[in-house]
Image (tube, rainbow, N blue to C red):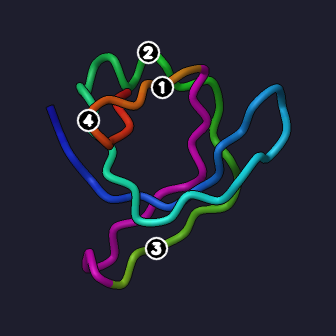
Amino acid sequence: MIQLIADGWLIRQGRRERQLSSVTVALHPFRFLRKISSFGKDLTFCFHAKGAGSPSVYFDEAEVLEGRIVI
């Protein structure tokens, strides 16, 4: 499992419900790749991670377990 801190939006039934900030996300790399439904065109770089960046990533589903999002 890999754990990281993320910001984003909770989307239900195709609509933004609320903003999520500094949420712990735990993911299994292969399960993570299988659950990706699409990517955004908004590549953003993180200054704290020395040039690492990511576009928006959309998942079909995720769970909340022990106060963290599990993908």
* C-alpha separation, residue under disc 4 versus residue under disc 1: 13 Å
Residues packed near mark 3 inside 10 Å, few (<14), some (14 to 19) or many (20 plus): few
* Contact flag, marks 4 and 1 (Cβ < 8 Å): no
**Image mark for residue 34:** 2
Determine the secondary structure under disc 4.
Answer: loop
| Residue pictured at 72% horizontal, 39% vertical | 11
The residue pinned by badge 4 equals 66
Which residue does the numbered mark 1 point to in the structure image? Answer: 62
- For badge 1, the amino acid type reads Ala
**Residue 4 locus on image (x, y percent):** 26, 53
> Residue 6 lies in what quarter of the image?
bottom left
Q: Look at the image and tell me in which quarter the C terminus lies.
A: top left
**What residue is drawn where x is 32% and y is 42%?**
68
- The mark that comes first in sequence, 1 or 3, is 3
Mark 1 or 2, closer to the camera:
1
Residue 52: x %, y % from top left: 34, 68
Q: Nearer the viewer, residue 36 or 19?
A: 19
Drawn side of residue 50 relative to residue 35, left or right: left
Q: What's the mark number on residue 54?
A: none
How far is mark 1 from mark 2, CA to CA?
12 Å
Give the residues drawn in magenta, as a range: 48-60
Residue 5 x/y as whole percent: 32, 59
**Residue drawn at the location 50% of the way across and 61% of the way down:** 7
Amino acid residing under circle 4: Glu
Report the disc number at residue 45.
3
Q: Secondary structure at mark 1?
A: loop
Which residue ends up furthest to the left in the rendered image? 1
10 Å neighbourhood of mark 1: few (<14), some, or many (≥20)?
Answer: few
Label 1, label 3: how far apart the Cα atoms are: 24 Å
- Picture layout, residue 68 above or below residue 70: below
Other residues around mark 4 within 10 Å, as few (<14) / some (14–19) / many (≥20)? few
Give the mark toward the camera: 4 or 2: 4
